[in-house]
Image (tube, rainbow, N blue to C red):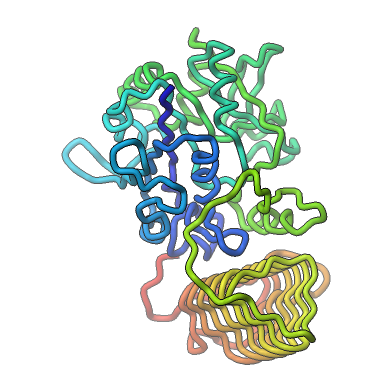
Amino acid sequence: MHTRAVILAGGEGTRLGVLTAKRTKPAVPFAGKYRIIDFPLSNCVNSKIFDVMLITQYRPQSLIHHIGSGGPWDLNREFTGGIKIFTPYKTQGINWFSGTADAVMQNLSYILSSNPEHVLILSGDHIYSMNYDELIRYHEQNKAEITICIHSVPKSQASRFGVVEVDKKMRVTNFVEKPDNPSSNMINMGIYLFNTGTLKQLLIKDAREITSQHDFGKNILPGLVKSKIPMVAYAFHDYWVDVGTVQSYWNAHMDLLTEPPKYDIRDRHWVIHTRSEERAPAYIHPNASIQSSLICDGCIIEPNVVIQNSVLSPGVMIRRGTQVINSIVLTDTVVGEQSVIQKSIIDKHTNVGARSHIGFSDGKRTRISMIGKNVLLPDNTILENGGMVGCDVKPVDLAEKRIHFGELVLPKGRDYDF
């Protein structure tokens, strides 16, 4: 039975701040050595789905570079499946994708080209491990035309998602996209399994609707509730998180560090595959102290360093006497000696000067501090918690060495599209 997976990986991810200033959301690093896209890709291959199509849009360069020919996921197959990456193109009558359904519609001819029986629509920006084979069996057992995956969240968070109501037979009875007052805590995960003919019919009909936003959550799924097309829900009870905000991205990293971890990326029965660069083993000085943290290859931890509840990507260097607490530090960043990093996210190739305090708190406010890619901060910099430094900032861009709560520092007189 042939299932083609279609991963929607074009998200701009503006709520992730500086992390998506120069990359699409699925390409954002996660858990030290991974990218967010690695999780749906690994779910596919672990579920024996090797026919994968990736649809991109916003800043896809680093994502395309990361995936390459698909070798790390065993998707470098030329004739039977493999991974194909599609970007939008502008011609007469065709424009940039206006919604998730439009992204699929504009690539429908290729999706149908191998005559799949099912089309599995996935979001490229969620952290979870799911066996899609179980979803397909559930879909067939229920004789469904469409199966959507649902997950329970605290009701206070449900308004961020599409809210779903079901009957005793798990048939969808109501679907409302991001309601102000959610009627349920069951939310749409952005994972849909369609019978191919049904998907084609729905997309063509939606494309003709002038008032439609051409989006699965906003238009197609709410419209199906009143139709006679069988749509059932598949309840997923394991770990799942949409890392679409700075807080949820930080929380998901902290979930890796609990004992036992809320989400175990070390599960040998469900390996998360990724494109890895060869690095020397990490070096940790015997006088350093590391607790409840993930330290990747190539890291250098100097004497008298304290690292607690943090994630360090490959090649990070922490100079002597520095403390890194409840933080995420991405690839090849250097933190100068005698510094303190607290509840912060620091992007790649950044250099934090000595005796700096990133995430400085007055004890009253506890927002996450962020530093973008390719930043150079001078010695004795203070970045208060909730402050943000944009990509490519240099010392000349700082009016003073203290960046205050809620302040955003950007490069002066240079192009910047954050």
Which image quarter is the C terminus in?
A: bottom left
Pick the front one: 363 or 128: 128
Task: Indicate the quadrant where residue 297 lies.
Answer: bottom right
Specify whether residue 370 is in view.
Answer: no
Residue 389 placement (x, y as % from top left): 56, 74
Q: Quadrant of the N terminus?
A: top left
Q: Write the residue at 34% across / 43% down.
A: 77
Q: Position of residue 355 (x, y in %)?
A: 69, 90
Tell me: 47 left or right of 268: left
Q: Is residue 183 above or below residue 231?
A: below
Q: Quadrant of residue 308?
A: bottom right
In-front residue for pair 78/385: 78
Which residue reaches farthest top? 228
| Front in this rendered view, residue 274 or 120 | 274
Residue 364 shows in the view: yes
Q: How many marks?
A: 0
| Image location (x, y in percent) of residue 24 | 44, 55
* Residue at 54 percent of width and 15 percent of height: 140
Counting from the top left corner in percent of width and height, residue 282 is at 63, 76
Q: Is residue 402 left or right of residue 11?
A: right
The quadrant holding residue 134 is: top right
Q: Residue at x 69, y 66 (%)?
A: 294
In the rendered view, does 360 fall on the left or right side of 277? right
Residue 112 vertical position relative to residue 414 in the rendered view, above or below: above
Task: Report the side of 184 relative to 316 (left or right).
Answer: right
